[in-house]
Amino acid sequence: MNTPHSLATSDLDVIVQGSGPALLLAHGAGGGIQGNFGLVLDDLAQDHTLVGPHYPGAGGSPVATEPLDLDNLADQLVAAAVAAGQESFAVLGESLGSAVAVRMAARHPERVRALVLTAGFAVADPVLALATRLIKSLADAGQWDDVARLAHLSCLASTDLADIDPAGLDAAVARTLAGMPPGTLDHFDLVSRVDVRADLAGLSAPTLVVVPTGDRLVLPESSYRLAKGIPGAQLIELPGAAHILNEADRATWLRHVREFLGTFPAVSA
């Protein structure tokens, strides 16, 4: 039986937008609310209250002074939603945010009404583990521009990369480098330590797992295993989609997410 956990005060920077049933957003490592969800924020906010906390070192959240702890991060996101007036909510988790969402649902089942897990993993697969080590090695050597290049190589669709000329690619890398939050290494350190496999079988929240089949950072097999481990989880594929969804794939994602969320009675604060 799950025992609800108490909540500490959250000091995370939080975006709150819209009205209606609450959606708590859990972003990925080295990302943020705009970076992960910017293409759909305005659309979802038409009929949902979006609560988007930034992890330590992202957005306006202070940089962590010690290694990130998954339980504490999950509790802080829940506390941010409660502080925004939302007693219960669905959670949209992407990449690392999927593991954070799973831990939220395991620790606070009375608050989490549904889960949407995109490009998710319960534990880092070999490709993600290698990428995490490369990011740390490059950052330790001060080669942050190469971290940004690795991000493009691993996170964008091959079809999108094929359409970028060398000058355009350099400009895109520069934009990625400029947008990397100070907490990027802390986030990827947590990626390397996450393991929520033991949480999966006990989850009670209805769950949708979205698999970008062209993902080169988190193997699609990680999402398949995630869905297999969660009782009753639904699974949909985004054929050829990359780790970071482009505009067309995000539109397809939005349609599936709306269909899934539309099956639940509306609940608002």
Image (cartoon, grey):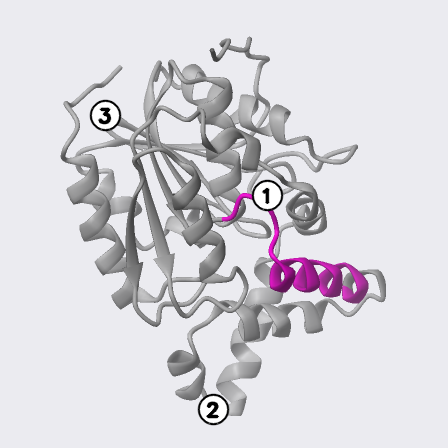
Residue shown at 46%/66% (left/top)? 215
Point out the tag, 3 or 1, that comes first from the N-terminus. 3
Are the residues flagged by discs 1 and 2 in contact, CB closer than 8 Å? no
**Number of callouts:** 3
Q: Position of residue 51 (x, y in %)?
A: 38, 31
Q: Position of residue 45 (x, y in %)?
A: 24, 38
Q: Position of residue 184 (x, y in %)?
A: 66, 51
Look at label 1 and name its amino acid: Ala
Q: In this orientation, which residue lies closer to the viewer: 156 or 64?
A: 156
Residue shown at 42%/22% (left/top)? 81
Tell us which disc is closer to us: 3 or 1. 3
Q: Secondary structure at mark 2?
A: loop
Residue shown at 47%/91% (left/top)? 165
Q: Position of residue 90 (x, y in %)?
A: 32, 29
User: Mark 1 — residue?
Assistant: 58
Q: Is residue 243 above or below residue 116?
A: below
Q: Secondary structure at mark 3?
A: loop
Magenta region: 121-138
Q: Is residue 249 left or right of residue 202?
A: left
User: Mark 2 — residue?
Assistant: 165
Are the residues flagged by discs 3 and 1 in contact, CB closer than 8 Å? no
Give the crowd class for mark 3: few <14, some 14-19, many >=20 residues within 10 Å: many
